[in-house]
Image (cartoon, rainbow, N blue to C red):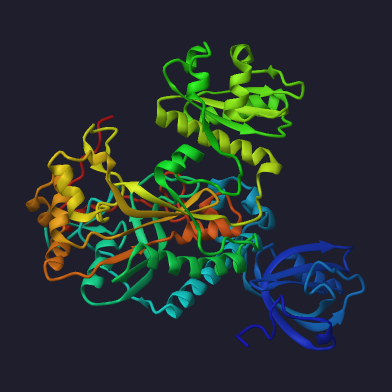
Amino acid sequence: MVQNRTHTCGGLRLADAGKTVKLSGWMENIREVGSELAFIVLRDFYGTTQIVAETPEMVAQFKAVNKESTISVEGLVRERASKNPKLPTGEIEIVPAKMEILGRCRHNELPFQINRSREADEAQRLKYRYLDLRNPEVKGNIVLRCQVVSAIRQAMTDHGFLEITTPILTASSPEGARDYLVPARNHPGKFYALPQAPQQFKQLLMTSGFDRYFQIAPCFRDEDARADRSPGEFYQLDMEMAFATQEDVFAVIEDVLPPIFAQYGKYSAASQAPFRRIPYLEALETYGTDKPDLRIDLTVQDATEVLGGCGFPPFEALTVKAVVVSGFEGTRKQIDKLCADAEVQSGSKAYWFRYDETKEIVGGIAKFVQPIKDQVVEALGLTPGCFVGLAAGAKGAAQKTAGVLLKLLGAFCPNHFQKEQYAFCWIVDFPMYEIGEESGELEFCHNPFSMPSGGLETVEKAIRGELDPLSITADQYDLVCNGVELSSGAVRNHDPEIMVKAFWMVGLGEEDVKAKFPAMYNAFTYGAPPHAGIAPGVDRMVMLLAGEDSIREIIPFPMNKNAMDVMMSAPSEVGQKQLDELHIALVKPEE
C-alpha cells in the first residue's frame, strides 16, 4: 500500500469492522452535532468514507481544517448504526484516533461546491479545473476516456496493427484548416507547423513497407470551437492499411468499435456489422445532412412539385422540402419554438401545417395548402394526425433547413426517436470537387489525397472536357454515429501521375505538387502500394459514450470557446529576448 494510507476511501466494507486503518484524502464536508460529535466525509479517487469524531478534542481538530484540505486519518473501523445503501462504504465508519493535515486548503470559500461543480459557470470551472476534476462525476468522464483508449489500443493490436508515433514538428501543409506555426530558431524566417493530422506520415509508412499502422494521434488545428470540436488540439484513432480497399477498412472499424460502444457506452446497444451505407447525395436528399441520426425514423421528402405553385410567396421558383410526422401532439407554442430553433440553427425560416383528425388542413400556411389538399395528401402520404414541417430555398439551403427540422422533430417525438442506442452508418461516394463558396473556383471537396473513383481514366476525361468535374466522386467515406461525424477516411491516391492530374484540376501544376508535398510525391515514384485508412475522433467517441453534449466535458484540461486556457493563462505574451532569439518582430493591429 502506498504511503499515508492502508486502504482507500472506497475500499472498506463491513468485513473490515474491528480493524485499525489509515485513510488519506480530501475533507469533503463536516457536519457538527454539538461540541462532542461531528460527521466528516473523507474523499479520495476511489470513493468516500464517513469519519465520526466523538470527543471535543477531535471535533475541534476537524473543525479547524478548511474543506478540501488533504488529511490522513487513523482509527477503528466499526459498523454504522445508520447505514447508507447508496454508498459502497455505507455500512461502516471510522472512529479516528489521530488526524494529520497533509495539505491545507487556505481558502475559506471555494469557487464552487465540488460535488455540484457542473452547475457552476463554465469560465469558473475552466479556471479552477483542478477543483472541477475533484467532482467524481467529472472525474468519471476522464476515467472513461482512459478505459476507452486502452480498449482501442488492445483491439487494434489484436487486429495486427503496430502503434507508431509520428512527428509533432513538421512542415506546413494545406489540409483544410489553419496551421499552428512554430518559429525555427536556427533557421531565421522559417517555421515548423504542428500537424493537422499525421496524414502524410502514415501514407509514407505504407510506402516504407509497414502493413498496418495506428496511433492515438494528437492533431492541431487553429479553428473555432463547437460543441463537438475542441479548439486547438484533439486526438484521433489514426490508422492506415497497405494493399487495402474501402471494404478492408470498414471490416476493421465494424469489428473494433461496436464492442467498445456496447461495453463503455451510456447505451448498451450498438449497430453491428455491416453498418448501413448511404451515398452522400442520397443522405442530403433523404435526411437533409451528411451526418444523419438513424435513431430518428423520419425522412425528408421533396415537395417542390406539389407545393411550389401553391401561391405561398416563399415557395415560388424554389426547392421545397417536407418532413412528415405522424402522431404529432405538439401545441402551437411548441411548434413555434421548433420553427424558431430551426431558423436559428439553419439560417432559414421553417413553415408548417397539420392534417388533422377530421382530414382538414389547419394551422401555419393552411390557407395556401387547403385548395390542393387532395394532391398534397397523396404526394406526401399524409394520414390524419400528421404534422408537416416545410423548408424552402435554393436546393442546398432547403435541404439544410429540412435536416435541422427533422432532427428537432425527432427529438421532440419519442415515438419517432429510439434514443438509447448507438446507430452507425457510412456516408460514401463523396464528391471529389466542389465550387468554393469564397473563391468561386473548383476546389477539393474534402481530402485532396483521396483516390478519384475510376482513377486516372476519370480524371483524364474531366481534363479533356468529356466529364463534368463536379460529377467525379472520391473513394472517400465518413463514419457517423447518432448524428455526429466520428471520422473521415479514404482509399488514398498513391499514383503520382493521378495525383498531379487531380491537383491540376484545381489549378496546381506538377511543380506545385512537388513543392507542397515533396516527400510523398517522391516516395510514390519509388513504387507505393494501394492503401486506405481512417481516423475516428477519440474525443467525439468518448463524448458519445459518456452521453455528454459538450466535448469539453471529456477533456482533462480543455480550452474555452476562444481557444484560451484560462487556468494556465495561455496564450500569453513572451519577453523581447525570446522574440529576438526567434527573429520575430511583432506588428500590433491598429486600434
Which residue is located at x 77 percent, y 21 percent?
Answer: 358
The picture quadrant where one finds residue 341 is top right
Query: Disc count in the image?
Result: 0
The front one of 121 and 331 is 331
Q: Position of residue 454 (x, y in %)?
A: 24, 53
Which residue is located at x 87 percent, y 68 percent?
Answer: 37
- Horizontal relation, residue 112 to residue 510: left or right: right
Residue 183 sits above or below residue 337 on the image: below
Which residue lies most toward the right here? 81
> Which image quarter holds the N terminus?
bottom right
| Residue 190 visible in the picture | no
- Horizontal relation, residue 187 to residue 375: left or right: left
Which residue is located at x 30 percent, y 44 percent?
Answer: 445
Residue 2 sits above or below residue 238 on the image: below
- Horizontal relation, residue 496 to residue 567: left or right: left
Q: Position of residue 524 (x, y in %)?
A: 15, 66
Q: Position of residue 59 (x, y in %)?
A: 81, 70
Residue 329 sits above or below residue 551 on the image: above
| Residue 65 visible in the picture | yes
The front one of 101 and 578 is 578
Q: Position of residue 405 (x, y in %)?
A: 56, 33
The picture quadrant where one finds residue 366 is top right
> Which image quarter holds the C terminus?
top left
